[in-house]
Amino acid sequence: MYSTASTGTRSSSPNGVDAAAARPSRSPLRPPTAGAGRPAPRGAELRDPRGRTTLVTRPVADQAGRLGRPAAGRAPEAFVDRVDPAALQTPAVRAVLANVARICPAFLPRQVLREGGRHILIAGTIGRAPVVAKCLAPAALRGERAEQLIERFHHEVSVYRAFVRHRPPVRLPRLVAADHDRCVLVLERVPGRPAARERHPVNAPTPGEVRAVLGAVRTLNLWRPPTDVFGKPMDYQTEIARYHSLGLLTDRDAGDLRGLLHGLSSMPWQLNHGDALLGNILLAPSGPVLLDWEQAGWYLPGYDLAVLWSVLSGDTAARRQISQLAQSGGTLARDAFLVNLVLVLMRELRLHDVPGAGEEQRIMIRRLYDDSALARRAVRAAVGTR
């Protein structure tokens, strides 16, 4: 939430396409080998490709002047906000600040963290407490997807309110205030940095960071709040029919997925974040913090693991850990993970396989097609063992 996780592309570096990507004998539970990359750089004013500020922290440089992680033993970074009066005076920002003031009169805006097509994020303080105001952008409220965006925002407000009554076992920003009608959330601002700054990161997190992220996700998945607190955001049969109609799934693929779903009809569902991209996970001094809960709810087991598997194509060790976690619950848990994985990969293809893609994006698209072929073959093999 505090960063802009862009739909980044993959390059032809050691984390890009390798010759092993086309081998038919691999399975999603046995991912291809590739080198783990270095962590993404950090800067005083990090920006996405469109030039919007993503996270404002003081940079840490080594002796050569390169930006990177803090040296061992350094104190955690504090927020170093640069007040930008011009950004705070744009019509869209002034409109959402008026809505924030209705529920938090003491909110003092400091900086616009994001002014995108859907959301506006404004860092500020209430007294001495650093907070972030998240609001739907006025332009989004007038767009053709306004109804869907409003529904998702209302769902996120409901999730944060539910977490006040039923405290989850994972770290997330504390709810300060919310306005359901005007689509405003005011949340605690947690110091830290995103686990990645791209949707499909070129530079994978370190092994220790991956373990911490997977540990937080699994802790959430194993939590059992009251079943009436959260809904079921995904209709699996509808999603299969959707990708089948788009030509991303063949008749046999759709039939295989429906066959696995039939066998999973009696399996308990699992609470998932629903959008566990690395850009939605903040690496804070106290551990991973999960952001952006718009799609949280009950899913077949392994949905968050499938999301992480889909975006960590350059990290063999991470995919191996995810595969082991997916299989640790037995055959049914493995089948549920495979159904989730195919649908997640279909979503990524629909998002990225668009006209006008650059070379790096085409490389990423080829990797997604390779991964989806492996996942479909694994589903076919799972159906054959029934």
Image (spheres, grey):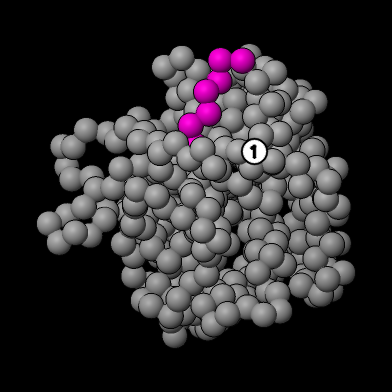
Quadrant holding the N terminus: top right
Q: Depth check: 321 or 18 in front? A: 18
**x, y (%) of residue 64?**
15, 61
Q: Depth check: 334 or 341 in front? A: 341
Residue at x-position 56% and y-position 26%: 187
Left or right of 234? Residue 121 is: left
Q: Residues within 10 Å of mark 1 (few under 14, many from 20)?
A: some
Quadrant holding the C terminus: bottom right
Q: Which residue is mark 1?
A: 93
Residue 106 falls within the magenta-colored stretch: yes
Q: Is residue 189 above or below residue 304?
A: above
Q: Quadrant of residue 162?
A: top right
Q: Quadrant of residue 214?
A: top left
Q: Is residue 142 above or below residue 122?
A: below
Q: Is residue 229 above or below residue 326?
A: above
Left or right of 188? Residue 232 is: right
Main secondary structure found in the magenta portion: strand
Left or right of 90? Residue 281 is: left
**x, y (%) of residue 61?**
21, 52
Secondary structure category for the residue under label 1 = helix
Residue at x-position 60% and y-position 75%: 365
Q: Which residues are magenta?
A: 105-111
Q: Depth check: 93 or 176 in front? A: 93
Q: Is residue 257 above or below residue 25?
A: above
Residue 123 falls within the magenta-colored stretch: no
**x, y (%) of residue 363?**
53, 79
Residue at x-position 62% and y-position 53%: 337
Q: Depth check: 6 or 209 in front? A: 6
